[in-house]
Image (tube, coloured by chain):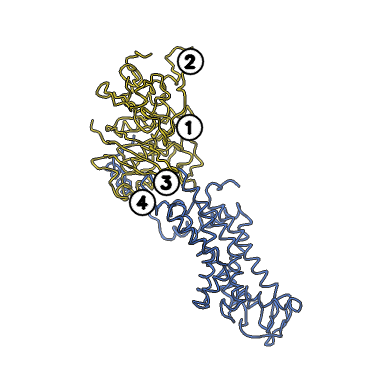
Amino acid sequence: MADLTPEKLSQDAARKLAEPVVPRTLKTAITANVTSARKTIWKFSKANPSGAIGGGVLLVIIVMALFASLLTPFRFDRSVGSRLAPMGSEARAGGEMYLGADEIGRDVFTRTLHGGRTSLYVGLAAPLIGVGIGLVLGISSAYFGGVIDLTTQRVVDALLIVPGLVLAMVITLSFGFSLQIVIIAISINMIGGVSRVIRSHALALRESQYVEALRAMGASDTRIIFKHLIPNSFAPAMVLFAVSVGGAITTEASLSFLGLGIAPPRPSWGSMLSNAQQYFRTGIHIVLVPGIAIGVTVLAVNLFGDALRDALDPRLRGRS
Amino acid sequence: MPEILQIKDLRTYFRSEDTIVKAVDGISYGIEQGETLAIVGESGCGKSVSALSILGLIPAPPGWIESGEIIFEGRDLLRLSDSEIRKVRGGSIGMVFQEPMSSLNPVMSIERQMTEGVRLHLGYTKGQARTRAIEMLEMVGIPDPETQLGRHPHHFSGGMRQRVMIAMALSCGPKLIIADEPTTALDVTVQAQILDLMKQLCQENDVALMIITHNLGVVARYADRINIMYAGRIIEQGTAREIYRNPSHPYSLGLLRSVPRLDGVRSEKLEPIEGQPPDLGDLPSGCHFNPRCRFALDRCTTEYPSIVDLNDSHKSACWVAEDIAAGVTN
């Protein structure tokens, strides 16, 4: 039977620590990590094939956006062909315009790649910030309750009352049209809704006995919130994140359309789509291309997000 | 044996709508080092609240501690700062809860949950804490502890989880374990195992054990002393033997008669205690038990009985305690 005193324990621990450790060279450590990463990815793909496809597509889109300037000979802000040239036509200086040209002759493929940089950045960063802050706010609000809950939720009410686009417009108008400001403006819009949803989820968690057990174990409020409640709210947070990506990309588009978003000529999928609206009849391709790009990205994020949620929830692990 | 915990005139109240609910209304008792004390009473008699008060876990608002002292290791727990009481919780006082199914965080491995306490209170490193966790799981009789550490709570049965909870409560080397209805949610066969285990571990390690229960039958084998609570007050306290042999409060007598006994006459009918436990926000005047009491006198409806000392250890809050103890009123 084990001895309970801390003194005896530390003796035991000291003995254990004194035992020789098998030396692990850097090389074996790296190989081990690579193999285990490969195994993890394989297991994940097998359990969630659709999620793996979503993740793969997302990865391809991100890589293409990152290396945009290497993948195309054209510049995104120069007219290189005739107006609304159809897909596959020749550029003036030579070279194929795979996806045609837009209303002033700029290469659509190039602009889509470069626009992806803006849209993906906004579409992933804004929900990350918005859901992150909303998560902490919602959980703290539910956990502490009372006056803190009341105050937080009234502030959230105020956020929810103002139409999102108007608030975003006011923010960009006051602080400038840079990418960062646009991201902040969009993420602030998400905080309200996210924190409300997470709060209702956390209200149930707060009453669960393991929270009481944690307090009886001497855990501090910060510890309970960050180490226990937030991981337990991961499932709804992931859904909220996936849902918000599409919203963020389109809000950014609306801002650009109103001339209050990221300043032209820097393209984004949203602004490309807005500009293309008048050319529905004459050049449908310049409407379809950014539209499909947004659609595919949002779908990929959703598939990947759902699979990630399942994979990270130990209760669902090893069931499918 | 020295008393490690002394509770003096503890009052814990809750505000509900427009009344004040006196969940715990002036209780005093002590626990000696290494002994097992049972607190027995119906649902809502204040037994859990009194335990939560010790650790300062009363949800506030709506609850608060009106007055009293809780002396533990020479300090009044009610006067400690937030960070000081956190060191006591889980450090020198461990707690085991009623629902093993929900007392563990479902998304976290057993290892992370078991190591949290010792890393927090004893400052162990990850490796030391892991060793400790394996040791503790072995101690509570969980086979193959190394493998179990990587598992999650849903892989465990109720009895296993309660064993894990006991291991966690004991892992920081506490002086006292408070077990709030530790076996209520378990199968009858597992109940005995868990109680045996707790009793044995506490005895071996000289840890005092406080069992809160509504089942007098459960505590008969395990408790050294018993406090019986009714409507927020202790109405009888004594050694287990005294309470079982010579119950001296009509409520204790009723509790004992409503539980079947193996050594009694088979054909004997069980006698329920008539009526309902009182509303704590609207208590009857005089003795709180008088509307349900077979022996009630006129005096019982006007005056709360003073405590009668039947001997050094045996006390009862009843005007006719001596008669009941002697069996006169039977």
3 and 1 marks in contact (CB < 8 Å): no
Res. B135 in view: no
Q: Give the residue drawn at x 51%, y 63%.
A: A158
* Chain B pictured colour: yellow
Which tag is nearer the camera, tag 4 or tag 2? 2
Q: Is mark 2 on a helix, strand or loop?
A: loop
Q: Name the residue under label 3.
A: B113
Which tag is nearer the camera, tag 2 or tag 3? 2
* Chain A pictured colour: blue
Report crowding for label 2: few under 14, some 14 to 19, many 20 or more residues within 10 A (C-alpha): few
Gap between marks 4 and 2 measured at Cα: 68 Å
Q: What element carries label 1?
A: loop
Question: Residue A21: which numbered mark, if any?
Answer: 4
1 and 2 marks in contact (CB < 8 Å): no
Q: Give the residue drawn at x 53%, y 59%.
A: A194
Gap between marks 2 and 3 measured at Cα: 48 Å
Lower position in the chain sequence, tag 3 or tag 1: 3
- Disc 2 is attached to a residue of which chain? B
- Disc 1 is attached to a residue of which chain? B
Q: Is mark 3 on a helix, strand or loop?
A: helix
Lower position in the chain sequence, tag 2 or tag 3: 3
Q: Mark 2 points at which residue?
A: B269
At label 1, the amino acid type is Leu
- Disc 4 is attached to a residue of which chain? A
